[in-house]
């Protein structure tokens, strides 16, 4: 059987149930120096400035990957699908990725997280998406990307 413990504090000579026990007073402490039980909440942080979310376009290096069973979004990985992994963009975001400076383009959907920050890459494309803009033998290519939906 569960026990119910309720602390009772003496308030103005009467008993009033509280959810937390009253603070303990020592001989050197007066009731006026005890912090109030219902202190004001901390101030809310300022809202982020406009445009502080994920970028809507960028440049960098992209690679390809074709291994893995599941993506971070929870769907099964398909190396033949036109998908990509991004560290910051929301799942489902559609991107146009073009080989830089001016080359072939492909439209992909973000469905995974990556690449690892230490690699210096901005996107990891599925095998099919990478093959649409470059030879798989290239491994890593310079790209530009922009959000299209």
Image: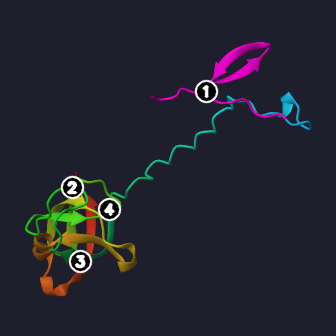
- Residue at which label 1 appears: 19
Label 2 crowding class (10 Å Cα cut-off): few <14, some 14-19, many 20+? few
Report the Cα–Cα distance between label 2 and label 4.
25 Å
User: Is 88 situated left or right of 149 in this image?
Assistant: right
Asked whether 119 or 140 is in front, the reply is 119
Q: Which mark is residue 63?
A: 3
Tell me, yes or no, whether the two marked residues, 2 and 1, touch with CB atoms within 8 Å.
no
Depth-wise, is mark 2 or mark 4 nearer the camera? 2
Q: Is residue 5 above or below residue 141?
A: above
Q: Position of residue 29 (x, y in %)?
A: 88, 36
Where, by quadrant of the figure, is residue 61 drawn?
Answer: bottom left
| Quadrant, the N terminus | top left
* Residue 102 makes an appearance in the image: no
Q: Position of residue 52 (x, y in %)?
A: 45, 53
Q: Secondary structure at mark 2?
A: loop
* Residue 82 makes an appearance in the image: yes
User: Is 7 situated left or right of 81 in this image?
Assistant: right
Label 3 crowding class (10 Å Cα cut-off): few <14, some 14-19, many 20+? many
- Of the two numbered discs 3 and 1 on the same chain, state the one appearing first in sequence: 1
- Residue at which label 4 appears: 57
């Amino acid at each position: 059987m569960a026990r119910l413990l309720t602390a009772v504090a003496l308030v103005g000579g009467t008993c009033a149930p509280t959810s937390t026990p009253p603070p303990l007073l020592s001989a050197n402490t007066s009731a006026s120096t005890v912090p109030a039980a219902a202190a004001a909440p901390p101030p809310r942080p300022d809202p982020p400035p406009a445009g502080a979310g994920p970028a809507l376009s960028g440049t960098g290096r992209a690679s390809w990957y074709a291994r893995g069973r599941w993506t971070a979004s929870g769907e099964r990985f398909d190396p033949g699908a036109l998908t990509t992994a991004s560290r910051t963009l929301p799942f489902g975001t559609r991107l146009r990725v073009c080989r830089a400076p001016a080359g072939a383009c492909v439209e992909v959907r973000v469905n995974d997280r990556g690449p690892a920050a230490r690699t210096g890459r901005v996107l990891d494309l599925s095998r099919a998406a990478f093959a649409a803009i470059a030879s798989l033998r290239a491994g890593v290519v310079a790209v530009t990307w922009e959000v299209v939906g």
